[in-house]
Image (tube, coloured by chain):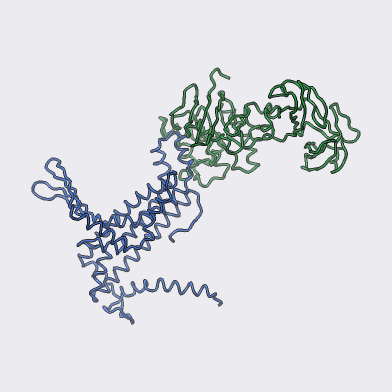
Amino acid sequence: MSSTPLIQMQDVHKYYGAYHALRGITAEIAEGEFFSLLGPSGCGKTTLLRAIAGFEEISSGAILLNGADMAGVPPNRRPTNMVFQSYAIFPHLSVEQNVGFGLRRSALSVGEKTRAIGEALEMVGLGHLGGRAAHALSGGQRQRVALARALILKPKVLLLDEPLSALDRKMREDMQVELMKLQREVGITFVLVTHDQEEALVMSDRIAVMFEGEIAQLADPEVLYRRPATKRVADFIGVMNFLPATASGRSVEAAGLGVADLAADQMPAGPVTGACTVGLRPETLSILHDGEASKAREASAQIEEVVYYGDMTYYDVRLDGMDTTMRISMRNMVGRDVLDVGARTRVAWDPRAMVVFPD
Amino acid sequence: MKRSPLALFAGLYLIFLYAPIILLPLFAFNDGTIIAFPLRGFTLGWFADLANTPALHEATLNSLIIACSVAVLATCLGLFAARAVTRYKFPLKGGILGFIMLPLVLPEVIVAISLLVVLMLLLPDLPIETGFQIGEYVIVLSVTPDLVLEVSNFHRTVFSFALPLPIILGHTLLCLPFSIAILQGSFQGLDQSLEEAALDLGETRAGAFRLVILPLVTPGIIASLLICFIISLDEFIIAFFLSGNEPTLPVYLWGQLRFPARLPVVMALGTILVTLSIVLLIVADIFRRRGLRRTGQSETGGFL
């Protein structure tokens, strides 16, 4: 990371009339980073992206690009380019004309422009489609054209507004990998807006999780998943089981499991005393079959629900003495049969997987 | 062959609508002054007569000038209104739009009479004149109520041009709802991020409008121009009330009906007008559909 961050957001607020859309966003994005804004719809992530692009004027605070305050700078004078959710491909122009649109005002010669357009199309794998009319493109091709069109100007920052949401699942997974490769190749800072937690985890260097106009947590994907700062973040990203617990210093007693001593980073909100909640991801727990031994600690339970996914089986189990069930995901391995509903079983758990949230 | 009653009804309906119009060309080519069957024989004489009637030519020219002016004026105003309505939120939007669209359902004769009253009230203050001099030329612009532009030097009038302003304004009032309806369709289909994308790629607001918005609504603009042109060309009541001694084509036609011998000539003229109307309507709709296709929309009704 260089010394000055490429994008600095300082206490950014945005009001639409009485509606408070952005509530004091402060964050920094480094050069060359793949940064994601993740959150449910209406959390302000798109508003923030549009504020960086210059389409929304912020009510207070500051957004700095490359150290320069962007207040009052229109979108066409900012070193950012955007890939729109609808892709916004100009339907009356050809693919080449779309990609070359941003070069209209550049001083390049016709030959240089043609070469730049060819290179940009080549980069997104559409070298053969330059002459095609834009309205005759498929969804995936439109997206590539939008990418080429934005990247041809070699912006400091590429802003992507839910770029994959219009694609089908298979195409989306392919494009995730391609976007990552592309970002590494061009070395441009990517800022991605998405509501898809999986997408954010797969692609990002760092993720800002946003709720109601505020950043709830800003961290790299692994920390975000393993050590979510709040119950809400934990619930939004993947699945997490919550158990009632009581804590005193580092020692926590989780209902149905037992007492465990935890490390400091397992209490992201700081040490808790008294009633609290313990969170455990489904894959950190396991069902022990008859005769299986575990190095981890055990609790006895009953299987209440079995959901078979082929490669995985999801069990809802009820720990002895508990009213609620928790979810455990198990890989279906050779020699390990899927258990039936109602079967008695032992659950293996590891204190190191626990996260403590204050109530 | 089995025919459902509905098909029969539809057939009768079409005959009721179009049989009278088919009579026009029938008698226009009929070699006889009396409009009655049986037909007497084929002739192009009535069309030749048209060519030899100077008063008709004047009326035609007058109508064309009015129709072109109305088409441009109504389409410009419609463009502003349609963009405002589709792009921006403002108070009383529904009410304002409702009032603009009102002439669609208002009896035309009422509009014509009210406009005539306004004109009568204004007449005592007319003409209003303004002029200036460039070198030896004097340029005078006056409202008489016709809009008259006159260029003269000290000896004689060099150039003079008159626009029948009252009829143009009346027709614009009438055409504006059609123009807005067509252009609103064009603007509604536009993805708002298209304009933002153009801005994002370095264009100014004016550049984005010229390079992206305008090309995409051009088919709508052309459709609006053609529809307004046709409406103005065919319009009778307002033109009848507001034309002075220079009749428009429909008003001239109406005047000719007093002379039975001229009836076949009127038929010939009517034939030409009907053909022109149908051709222009078809062209207008082709442009409207092309516009829809460009913005990637599906067919949503229309005039044809």
- Check the rendered structure and report the hue given to chain B: blue
Q: Quadrant of residue B241?
A: bottom left
Q: Foreground residue, A49 or A58?
A: A58
Quadrant into which the C terminus of chain B falls: bottom left
Residue placed farthest to the right in the image?
A: A291
Q: Quadrant of residue A197?
A: top right
Q: Is residue B159 visible?
A: yes
Q: Foreground residue, A245 or A206?
A: A245
As drawn, B10 above or below A205 = below
Task: Give the percent coordinates (x, y) of residue B233.
Answer: 31, 61
Q: Foreground residue, B67 or B81?
A: B81
Residue placed farthest to the front in the image?
A: A274
Quadrant into which the N terminus of chain B falls: bottom right
Measuring 44% from the left and 29% from the top, which residue is drawn there?
A73
Task: Give the percent coordinates (x, y) of residue B290.
Answer: 45, 53
Answer with left or right where residue A54 lies relative to residue A191.
left
- Check the rendered structure and report the hue given to chain A: green
As drawn, B110 above or below A344 = below
Residue placed farthest to the top in the image?
A: A3
Task: Give the percent coordinates (x, y) of residue A193.
Answer: 58, 34
